[in-house]
């Protein structure tokens, strides 16, 4: 069809109107002012077309989104030092103006002449206007529930936030859209060299020209916003989420891969991006798989490496998990198995550092990757491990010299005022191996929590420096002591968890059900969920029966009989907090309710099936305690649990610990290990590395999950107990010391501001 020259301008305007209607679903939003007689499509057809767009069920279509376009006039550019003189706002939805808000504001100060020349607002004009404390509540009510839009939104929202803070009003957590960023994203620099409001209003044919008055500028910004949205409607931007994600630069190839997230469930789990050769590029976890993976193909992802990874990806695999703990554990194991190139953690799969004693007649500290018996760690940084080792060597007398000494040699390092070997004695005779032996023994006792004399000596030295008013020296030693206490507590806390052969814990899922975890020697062996209305104990039994077999890297030995026996405490169970206490003890009955509620304040350890067997966390023997709960009457048909055993990172379903120890699985699970000791007995100790071969990251993840509020201990084979003289007793001191180190001296802010 050929249009005459007279009808051409009207036809162009009609095309603009139809483009806008595809986004907003309303032909009446015609930015070019087309008369109704030129509208060729009935109202019902654009609405139907808009409803046929493939929106995500969680997104808000643009034609249903309420925008409040705001503009401010101020006395200057600083939100802290200047004030608002005028507020203008326009509320729109679906192309229709729902309301306007305009008022002058008394800034409480004179308006500078240069601002008067620009805005025309004088001090006399605003002297009778209300103060911002009276205006702001009305504006916040006007903008409630809407998307806040402004031209250079950072400037306007900064003034509004500062005013809300001074008025002690809560600032709403509303989405903010900046038309400057949107214009820079939509318009090229050739078409729009400047994105000033006046330039955009002229370029896009706004019906209102900006005048540096708040309401006029807000009306002009409304026209600019509608024109920009009309331009991106054909690029797949039809919802508020897509509009906000469109602002960063997203390539068409990245946006086209959104189909990878289409079939993913809205469940917790692990996702794996795979490349052209089916190799794993990246592994991550999500509470909602579909929502999380979808963000990689929008502007929400701003990391350059992730954009590069998405460009290489050909598909996304996923593993649905019962809850967040299983997802985190699976991620750690998959990272170790695949070492994907775009995960930072894959560069250092064994990134933990440990402090250990060397195997020689005159032991000294060594910082290693693989822990040995009586090792201290883990540390994320080698420097942190070296600092703690230096502190311990200094206060225990462990040698730091590098000379390798034989059994018949003697240690004769000369004493030094600064930086000498801690084992050097002032004027004393050289040390033989027998003379030196008590020093590494004291270090081992400190690490395992059998003796805390070293920590007591360090704290006494801090007090001595403080009394002598050597405050800087005391502060440096305080910080070093806090690092030592943190390291010792971390080792003892994780080691205590790995000594429990089997621990079954439950956490409320927030919907009336329970999340379960079967933990064996600090490793997650099975995970599942009992939904609301499902008897939980049959689910637990199914999970235990199908749980992964865990073979620890160590051997069980009987506890020395010389240890004193302490009486048992009344039965209770609950989650373990950071100090080893039990919170909210109780047990689950067959309907998921808690029996015997209460709270046990005194620290202790769990005995058989969850009873406390000793006081104060002491590593002492205890009397045998009866089971926490007798077998419950089960239903005729238990619902199959939602969950599965957690497979290890190895191949072919090998037990954790590797194939070299697989021959011990049958003996261990049968109740007697190859050493002849029953590993499920209450009074045994494990000889081996601190974590018995478990991954430090996994044990730490499990420990954090157990410390969450609301966790219940359903059943346990051994009691959780930290050593009696462990660093847990000094954890409060370390927290206080760290808080003091973070505190800023009085006057620091003033000095920094004034130079």
Image: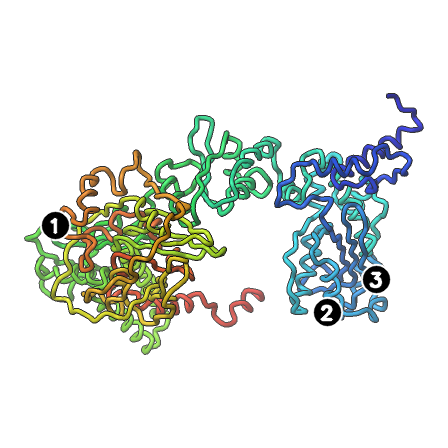
Q: Nearer the viewer, residue 646 or 12?
A: 646
Q: Is residue 700 visible?
A: yes
Total marks shown come to 3
Task: Assess disc 3: are there few (<14), some (14-19) or many (≥20) residues with their C-alpha within 10 Å of its C-alpha.
Answer: many
Residue 121 shows which numbered tag? 3
Query: What percent of the width, then of the height, locates residue 496?
Result: 27, 58
Mark 2, secondary structure of its residue: helix
Query: What percent of the width, then of the height, locates residue 290?
Result: 53, 41
In the image, taking residue 308 as reference, residue 57 lies left or right, namely right
Task: Assess disc 1: are there few (<14), some (14-19) or many (≥20) residues with their C-alpha within 10 Å of its C-alpha.
Answer: few
Marks 1/2 in contact by CB < 8 Å: the verdict is: no
Which residue has dot 1 on it?
676
Mark 3, secondary structure of its residue: loop
Residue occupying image coordinates x 50% and y 29%: 314
Q: Quadrant of the C terminus?
A: bottom right
In the image, taking residue 652 as reference, residue 171 lies left or right, namely right
Q: Nearer the viewer, residue 159 or 589?
A: 589
């Amino acid at each position: 069809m050929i249009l005459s020259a007279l009808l051409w301008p009207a036809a162009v305007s009609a095309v603009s109107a139809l483009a806008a209607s595809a986004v907003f679903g309303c032909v009446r939003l015609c930015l070019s002012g087309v008369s109704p007689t030129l509208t060729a499509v009935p109202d019902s057809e654009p609405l139907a077309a808009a409803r046929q767009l493939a929106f995500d069920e969680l997104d808000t279509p643009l034609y249903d989104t309420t925008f409040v376009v705001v503009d401010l006039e101020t006395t200057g550019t600083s939100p802290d030092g200047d004030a608002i003189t005028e507020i203008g706002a326009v509320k729109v939805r679906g192309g229709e103006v729902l309301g306007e808000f305009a008022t002058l504001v008394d800034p409480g100060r004179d308006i500078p002449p240069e601002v008067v020349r620009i805005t025309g607002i004088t001090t006399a004009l605003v002297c009778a206007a209300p103060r911002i404390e009276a205006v702001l509540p009305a504006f916040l009510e006007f903008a409630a529930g809407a998307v806040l839009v402004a031209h250079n939104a950072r400037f306007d929202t900064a003034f509004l936030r500062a005013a809300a803070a001074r008025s002690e009003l809560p600032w709403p957590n509303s989405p903010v859209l900046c038309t400057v960023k949107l214009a820079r994203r939509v318009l090229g620099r050739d078409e729009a060299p400047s994105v000033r409001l006046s330039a955009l209003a002229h370029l896009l044919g706004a019906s209102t020209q900006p005048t540096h008055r708040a309401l006029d500028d807000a009306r002009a910004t409304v026209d600019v916003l509608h024109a920009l949205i009309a331009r991106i409607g054909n690029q797949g931007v039809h919802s508020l989420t897509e509009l906000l994600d469109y602002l960063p630069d997203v390539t068409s190839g990245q946006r086209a891969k959104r189909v990878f997230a289409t079939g993913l469930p809205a469940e917790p789990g692990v996702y794996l991006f795979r490349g052209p050769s089916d190799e794993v590029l990246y592994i991550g976890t999500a509470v909602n798989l579909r929502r999380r993976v979808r963000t990689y193909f929008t502007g929400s992802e701003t990391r350059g490496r992730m954009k590069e990874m998405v460009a290489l990806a050909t598909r996304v695999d996923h593993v649905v998990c019962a809850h967040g703990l299983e997802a985190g554990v699976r991620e750690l194991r998959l990272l170790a198995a695949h070492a994907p190139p775009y995960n930072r953690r894959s560069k250092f799969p064994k990134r933990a550092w440990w402090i250990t004693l060397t195997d020689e007649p005159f032991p000294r500290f060594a910082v290693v990757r693989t822990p040995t018996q009586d090792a201290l760690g883990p540390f994320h940084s080698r420097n942190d491990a070296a600092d703690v080792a230096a502190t311990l060597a200094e206060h225990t007398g462990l040698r730091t010299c590098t000379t390798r000494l034989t059994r018949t040699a003697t240690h004769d390092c000369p004493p030094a005022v600064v930086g000498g070997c801690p084992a050097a004695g002032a004027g004393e005779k050289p040390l033989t191996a027998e003379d030196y032996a008590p020093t590494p023994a004291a270090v081992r006792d400190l690490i395992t929590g059998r003796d805390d004399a070293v920590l007591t000596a360090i704290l006494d030295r801090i007090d001595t420096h403080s009394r002598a008013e050597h405050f800087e020296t005391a502060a440096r030693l305080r910080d070093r002591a806090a690092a030592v206490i943190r390291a010792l507590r971390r080792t003892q806390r994780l080691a205590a968890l790995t000594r429990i052969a089997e621990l079954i814990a439950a956490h409320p899922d927030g919907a009336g059900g329970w999340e379960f975890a079967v933990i064996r020697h600090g490793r997650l062996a099975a995970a599942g969920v009992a939904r609301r209305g499902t008897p939980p104990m049959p689910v637990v039994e199914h999970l235990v029966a199908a749980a992964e077999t865990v073979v620890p890297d160590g051997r069980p030995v009987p506890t020395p009989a010389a240890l004193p026996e302490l009486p048992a405490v009344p039965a209770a169970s609950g989650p373990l907090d950071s100090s080893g206490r039990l919170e909210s003890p109780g047990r689950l009955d067959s309907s998921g309710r808690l029996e015997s509620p209460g709270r046990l304040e005194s620290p202790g350890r769990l005995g058989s099936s969850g009873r406390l067997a000793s006081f104060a966390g002491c590593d002492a023997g205890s009397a045998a305690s009866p089971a926490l709960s007798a077998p419950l009457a089960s239903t005729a048909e238990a619902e199959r649990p939602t969950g599965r055993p957690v497979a290890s990172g190895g191949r072919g379903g090998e037990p954790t610990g590797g194939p070299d120890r697989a021959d011990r699985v049958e003996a261990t699970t049968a109740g007697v290990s190859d050493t002849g000791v029953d590993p499920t007995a209450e009074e045994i100790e494990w000889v081996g590395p601190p974590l018995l071969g478990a991954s430090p990251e996994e044990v730490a993840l499990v420990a954090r999950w157990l410390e969450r509020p609301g966790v219940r201990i359903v059943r346990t084979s051994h009691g959780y107990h930290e050593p009696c003289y462990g660093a847990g007793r000094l954890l409060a001191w370390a927290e206080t010391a760290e808080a003091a180190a973070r505190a800023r001296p009085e006057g620091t802010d003033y000095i920094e501001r004034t130079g």
